[in-house]
Amino acid sequence: MKYIISKSFDTEEEKRVNFISKLVGLPLYPNPNAFDGFALYQTFPFIPNPNICLIFAHNYEVAKFLTENISLIPEDNIFIVSCAVNYFKNYNIPNKNIYLCDQNENGYALFRKGLTYNLDFDPTDTEIYLAQSKEQDILKKFTSCFKKAYINIKE
């Protein structure tokens, strides 16, 4: 599993990484210089198991990241925590299943006050769903909390 977070969210990075690590029950190891403008965290061994790549960034950053780096992402399932407004078509990647966090009617991901949900950062609705999910299987947990955007491969 990979967790890729934009360096534009440096102030939240550690809190978000700890959240995801606890959520999946696996430690995430940093490789902060793997991608320009992004920090990479991944489970060990460094293989796509669980078969998930989670990306947290602004919509234009996600679009640029996918264009420039998709060949370095072996995971079949890409989960995006970002707005989709103006960039949704850029998220369609051949041979990958793409999932997107909840969006409002205008294509924006909304942030909630973290303290309301016992979180030390302001989560999106989808991150709240993940925190509240009782699903044990990590891939099932993610697919049940995110919305299918593009399904381009068969599991």
Image (cartoon, helix red, strand yellow):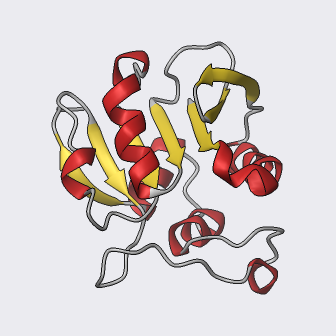
Residue 114 left/right relative to 127:
right
> Which of the image's four quarters has the C terminus?
top left
Residue closer to the observer: 68 or 142? 68
126 vs 68, left or right, is right
Q: Position of residue 102 (x, y in %)?
A: 40, 71
Q: Quadrant of the N terminus?
A: top right
Judging depth in this view, the residue of 132 and 72 nearest the camera is 72
Residue at horizontal 24 percent and vertical 46 percent from the top: 90
Quadrant position of residue 145: bottom left
| Closer to us: 90 or 44 | 90
Residue 123 occupies quadrant: bottom right
Left of 43 or right of it: where is 10?
right
- Identify the residue shown where x is 45% and y is 29%: 51
Residue at image location 73% in from the left, 41% down from the top: 25
The residue located at (73%, 34%) in the rendering is 26
- Residue 113 x, y percent position in the rendering: 72, 83
Q: Is residue 61 visible?
A: yes
Residue 19: tell me if it is visible: no
In which quadrant of the rendered view does residue 69 lie?
A: top left
Image location of residue 62, percent across then percent down: 42, 46
Residue 152 locus on image (x, y percent): 15, 37
